[in-house]
Amino acid sequence: MTWALVFLALIMALVIGYLLSQTINRQPWLADDPLENRPSGMPQSILPSKLGLGVLLAVITSMFGLFFSAYVQRMELADWSRVQEPSVLWINTVVLVLASIAMNQALRGARRDDVRATRRALIAAGVLSFAFLVGQLVAWGQLRDAGFYMRGNPAAAFFYLLTAIHGIHLVGGLWVWARTSNRLRGVDKVGEFRLSVELCTVYWHFLLLVWLFLFALLLNT
Amino acid sequence: MAYVAIADRDDPHAMHHPKSFVTRYIWSQDHKVIAIQYSLIAIAVGLVALVLSGMMRLQLGFPDTFSFIDPADYYQFITMHGMIMVIYLLTALLLGGFGNYLIPLMVGARDMVFPYMNMLSVWVYLLAVIVLMASFFVPGGPTGAGWTLYPPQAILEGTPGASWGIILMLVSLAIFIVAFTMGGLNYVTTVLQARCRGMTLMRMPLSVWGIFMATVLGLLAFPALFVSAVMMTLDSLIGTSFFMPAIVSLGETESYDGGSPILFQHLFWFFGHPEVYIVALPAFGIVSDLLSTHARKNIFGYRMMVWAILAIGGLSFVVWAHHMYVSGMNPYFGFFFATTTLIIAVPTAIKVYNWVLTLWRGDIHLTVPMLFSIGFIFTFVHGGLTGLFLGNVVVDVPLSDTYFVVGHFHMVMGVSPILVIFGAIYHWFPKITGRMYNDSMGKLHFWLTLLGTYSIYLPMHYLGILGVPRRYFAMGTTDFIPDSAQAMNAGITVSAIIVAVVQIVFIVNMAWSVFKGKKSGGNPWRATTLEWQTPQTPPEHGNWGEKLPVVYRWAYDYSVPGAKEDFIPQNEPPEAGVIAGREHGVEHS
């Protein structure tokens, strides 16, 4: 549980620190006219959807943190035996990194308001992400052929479970990706879709980070 | 395009106003309609849980009398009663119901910032409830594992509902967590981004503070329940051994090996303890506003109240293992968690002092919401003090799994939040419906509920000290439990049935008043907060008409010396050159 605690302590420290900075040294009982002097402590200029995504990522981080700490705690028990990770995972990792880079390219295209470049990069990112998912399924197959099932070996069970949870989150991202790329068809300005591309990019980078962390954890235990 | 803060956008036509009955009342994206949908579903499922507790009490009060209750039924009643009350009633009603209704109105927003997701949230919540209720109709019935669902027994044969019931329970919880996350994203983002002009964080009513912090806790803690639900589902369906140790069950060796039931307990309580505050913090916030409004006095120590909410929120993540003193964990852990438990009592006690000091020399109006709020102070102090007993390892170990614990947690997180919920429903009923409830029926409801619940839970503490164990279908004969304990159990059952029946008064009062109550006007309590200043009552879609409100002051300007009336609404500009409080040299807070 220590891992999860450290995570949550960090998030809580951020939240409480922000709130304290907004509440300390205020005299709430004093009235004044906000139209004359704009009071500090008003909402920052962040788009609600960006903040919303940030909160969602905090929730997902909390979930993965708890999965990881359950993993570490379960690992300390007597019956733990290591799993040989399938080598295809290395290729998958490269593919996911490429997907993230492509997403970044899409974002740069969107910032230049270049619809063609945005669409091309976006589609590349999606295809690479699908390739990653297929690669994960191949890894499952390899692991199964090596005789590791969910039953009987807790390390293998965690392997299937954690990769599945990560994959499901990627599938969720791909759903938003599909909607965004679909809407970008036949428009000649990125305009309002820039925000969608931006949110997708953040989400993809986040899932890449989670994967790198997860992969490192799997390799080392 | 430049970003225009929500508070600076005035145009109500940007919202899509619903046209048909279906989009207005069923697939509605209006936070007020969603709040009512949430509340009605929660209250309906809560009534099911109330009936279940009545059945349990019948068995306990008069054993060997009711042939339709066998031990398996009894365990199923316990489990479903606990889980429904904590998650599907209290969490859903306080956050989904009051959170949805109050946040946009109190911070001066037109709606939640993601209305579509808000609508999804309530329908996914309904799905979770349907899945849970479905478990009453599957082979084997609902799970009887106890609301904590501890493995290994939760999924082993011999426990009621070990095949279908437990799976439906876990799936329903996972769905609930998805629903809660969709709602929670809205509550947090709305509070942070959609406050109207002048509504600084330190001018928010404490109700919003409580709901906001509880949502943050929920967003970070519910994943722990999700993780444990997923892993237990796999243990049950696929036969993994995340939580399941090697075990011989009913004479047969199970295929499980090496899992850790304690791991589940850690994950469960890592969610479970913050859950207590997910329920308590909104209640704390709401009761602060009710006390201040009906005592016509500013809340004592507003800033301290806010910081106490923050402190409780932070600390609630480091006390979880005080639920596990008897689980066999390292005794030094127990020492650590006993210490943090005592520390969290400090901000909680500050809140209680401040409530009492708010009443001190106030102009107390004994309205129905006020009665419920004062009742809450009693039950909460009571439950909080017994919490200090149980927080200490040496006192907890002998009292563990006795009725003392049952009495304690029902007092602190059963009765107390429910009293606040009743108070809040009576308080905001005129705003929600535009009509007043029947005052005498409300007072009757209050007195019978308060005295009734006291006569249920106070004796339970005594039973616990005698050593009467909880969760038992029947006590049988023992050397240490006197016969009089049975008489007391019968008395508790009679009180419980009376309290349950009294709730009919509440439901009839509400149902009748919605249609026939006296028109209440927009601000019957002469309250300062924004929701009472809406142009229409009940507020229409978009809440504020053409212009968003502008806030000039905090929510607690009651009985300001020199003011024309004994309250100044938050959106009333200061008179030229006069700044409330300062001019008269009045010391607040």
Image: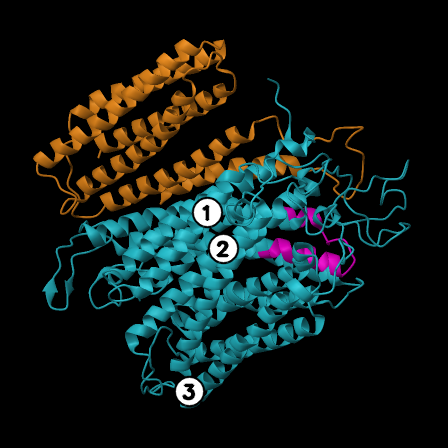
Chain colours: A orange, B cyan
Label 1 with label 3: CB-CB less than 8 Å:
no
Label 2: few (<14), some (14–19) or many (≥20) C-alpha neighbours in 10 Å = many
Label 3: few (<14), some (14–19) or many (≥20) C-alpha neighbours in 10 Å = some
The label nearer to you, 3 versus 2, is: 2
Q: Chain of mark 2?
A: B
Front residue of B238/A158: it is B238
Q: Mostly what secondary structure, the magenta segment?
A: helix
Q: Residue at x 68, y 31 (%)?
A: B11
Residue behind mark 3? B486
- Residue B474, given in percent of the width and then of the height, sits at 33, 81
Residue behind mark 2? B91
Q: Chain of mark 3?
A: B
- Residue A116, given in percent of the width and then of the height, sits at 40, 9
Dot 1 falls on a residue whose secondary structure is: helix
Label 2 with label 1: CB-CB less than 8 Å:
yes
- Most extreme residue toward the bottom is B483
Dot 2 falls on a residue whose secondary structure is: helix
**Are the residues under marks 3 and 2 on the same chain?**
yes
- Most extreme residue toward the front is B20
Front residue of B232/B348: it is B232
Mark positioned earlier in the residue sequence (3 or 2): 2
